[in-house]
Amino acid sequence: MTTEIKTISSNLENWQPLTKVADVFPQFTKPQLKRLFWQRQQHPGLSLCYRQVGKRGYICLPLFGMWLAGQLSEPHSVERL
């Protein structure tokens, strides 16, 4: 599972700006996503899906989908890909 996560996270096409994710997936609003990722330390595994570059936040969509499905857990976040 760890090699799969590294492969997914190393593909730059998987990372989308936080503001565009709400446009692509209308079930999430921008404030919902912003609040969720502000509190990412409270949700095990969610910090793997998010990276802050300067003032912009980026979400790895495949990893976010895995987190929503319950496939990302805390032990993976220890390695800090």
Image: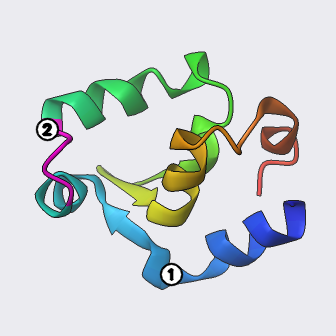
Q: Is residue 26 magenta?
A: yes
Residue 71 vs residue 46: left or right? right
Instruction: Please name the residue shown 13% across and 50% down the image.
Output: 26
Q: Secondary structure at mark 1?
A: helix
Residues under labels 1 and 2: Cα distance? 23 Å
Left or right: where 55 falls relative to 11: left
- Given the current orientation, which residue lies at the most extreme top position? 42
- Crowding around mark 2 (Cα neighbors within 10 Å: few <14, some 14 to 19, many 20+) is few
Scheme of colours in the image:
rainbow
Task: Give whichever of 74, 25 is nearer the camera.
Answer: 25
Task: Report the label total.
Answer: 2
- The quarter of the image holding the N terminus is bottom right
Identify residue for label 1: 12
Quadrant of the rendered image containing residue 59: bottom left
Name the mark on residue 29: 2
Residue farthest toward the front in the current orientation of the protein: 69
The picture quadrant where one finds residue 10 is bottom right
| Observer-nearest of 57 and 67 | 67
Residue 6 in the image: x percent, y percent?
77, 69
In the image, the segment drawn in magenta is 25-30
Which secondary structure class fits the magenta region best?
Answer: loop
26 in relation to 39, above or below: below
Q: Position of residue 28 (x, y in %)?
A: 20, 40
